[in-house]
Amino acid sequence: MIEKREILQMAQRMSLQPNVVEKDDVLGWMLAGIYAHDDLKDSWIFKGGTCLKKCFFETYRVSEDLDFTITDASHLNENFLKRVFGEIGQWVYERTGIELPADKQDFDIYPNPRGSMQCEGKITYRGPVSPNSGGLPRIRLDLLADERLVLAPVRAAVFHPYSDEPEEGLFANC
């Protein structure tokens, strides 16, 4: 895990709150965990504003959620999502020390206006500047399985300007 000092220095340099910098680091590791997971890596396509920021325009904006088009609708299942995010949480913790407590995950699956199912997930995390009391911060996931892909997904490097970036880098299918 990156040290609190690094987050504070980065926040000052970027004129951001430390919790925003911490969340950006966690977002990178969540993406790394998703694309390291055999059940997800080929069927989850990263999209939206966070994708633009993390993979295409480094200074575009700071984002707080992860949006995906899912090519396997069977993934919109609470038991499946709890299992894979429990595994992703363990994978991230082993590499970084960032906690993604499995008992604090929430997946709300419901019909969208087009009549297909979608999911809004909330993944709680604890990093180096997360509060020790009160509620922990969360990352929101938006998962849709009824979107048509017009172009083939591309593998893109994830911009991760922190000392905990692995040598091989971080990547996502966008």
Image (cartoon, rainbow, N blue to C red):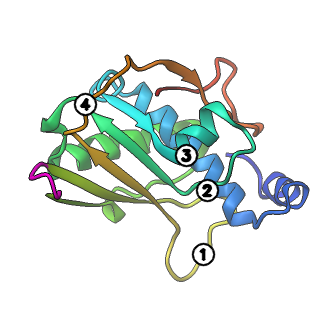
Q: Amino acid at mark 4?
A: Arg
Name which of mark 1 and mark 2 comes first in the sequence: 2
Residue 119, numbered circle: none
Front-lying residue, 102 or 171: 171
* Residue at image coords 46%, 28%: 174
The answer to whether mark 4 and mark 1 are in CB contact below 8 A is no
Q: Helix, strand or loop at disc 3?
A: helix
Query: Badge 2 is on which residue?
Result: 23
Boundaries of the magenta span:
112-116
Name which of mark 2 and mark 3 comes first in the sequence: 2
The answer to whether mark 1 and mark 2 are in CB contact below 8 A is no
Position of residue 96 measured from the top left corner of the image (x, y, whole percent): 60, 41
* Residue at image coords 17%, 57%: 112
Query: Badge 3 is on which residue?
Result: 50
Q: Helix, strand or loop at disc 1?
A: loop
Q: Helix, strand or loop at disc 4?
A: loop
Q: How many marks?
A: 4
Horizontally, residue 57 falls left or right of residue 11, namely: left
Query: Badge 4 is on which residue?
Result: 148
Name which of mark 4 and mark 1 comes first in the sequence: 1
Badge nearest the viewer, 4 or 3: 4
Residue 114 counted in the magenta span? yes
The answer to whether mark 1 and mark 3 are in CB contact below 8 A is no
